[in-house]
Image: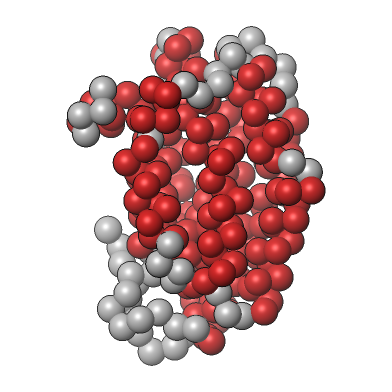
Amino acid sequence: MNEMTLTPPMQQPTLEVSIKSHITSIIDNQITGLPEIEKLTSDEIRGIIARYSAVLEGNFIYWMTATYLAIHVEEARDIIIENLTEEVRDSHPAMLRTFALAADAFPTAHDSLVINAELTKVRLFLGKLEGVQSLAAMAYFESYIQRFMSYLADLAAARGSAERVYTDVHGVCDIAHSEGLFRAVSLEMAINPMKPGANLYEGVDLLSTLVDSINHGSSRAATTGLL
């Protein structure tokens, strides 16, 4: 694990580049490690879509709201508000549900249990209202989603679905969202720095583990006794 703890202030552009580089490296590894769709059964494909839906539909707006409550810098808050406004105004949760239903991949109780432990850890972390770390986590997640969308669309196609509204929208809008969030991290750190010894990537690490549970759910759940 690569931890960045509280250090003397860096120039904002340098800090932003450093954070983005580290997070991009994590995402690169996750995208490279995605299961080959051709080697998955139809039910395994359904599981990935269902677990993704189980996490995102009921949690993303909550996560962003928690981050808004944690931060102090007005410009950073404006970035979060713009994101939340799009999520609510355009009803992204309904968009995602339509996508999952079209692929016959609506989450079951089993799907929710597979990601329950990791999801709970993310919720508890965000409940600590740590501004800088929460922004870093959201920057990671927005960046990941944008790159994951083409794969998610291919999963749905393999299930016989032609529904693409959700994946098309998030493949575009999340580019601007993630760039704004990376900028917000350095802005927040200058005004509301982390506590001494804090790990900048605490939330990123928790969210990336949750993402792994979405993408590789069955094997990971088995090791935790959920299956």
- The reply, left or right, for residue 180 in relation to residue 70 is right
Residue extending furthest toward the bottom: 8
> To which quarter of the image does residue 216 belong?
top left
The residue drawn where x is 78% and y is 43% is: 90
* Colouring style: secondary structure
Q: Count every numbered label the image shows and give the total.
A: 0
- The reply, left or right, for residue 169 in relation to residue 35 is right
- In this rendering, does residue 26 appear at all? no
Q: Position of residue 164 (x, y in %)?
A: 72, 26
The residue drawn where x is 67% and y is 79% is: 74
* Quarter the N terminus occupies: bottom left
Residue extending furthest toward the right: 89
Q: Position of residue 75 (x, y in %)?
A: 68, 76
Vertical position of residue 41 compared to residue 117: above or below: above
The residue drawn where x is 50% and y is 33% is: 54
Q: Position of residue 187 (x, y in %)?
A: 58, 79
* Quarter the C terminus occupies: top left
The residue drawn where x is 40% and y is 79% is: 194
Q: Position of residue 118 (x, y in %)?
A: 35, 43
- In this rendering, does residue 144 appear at all? yes
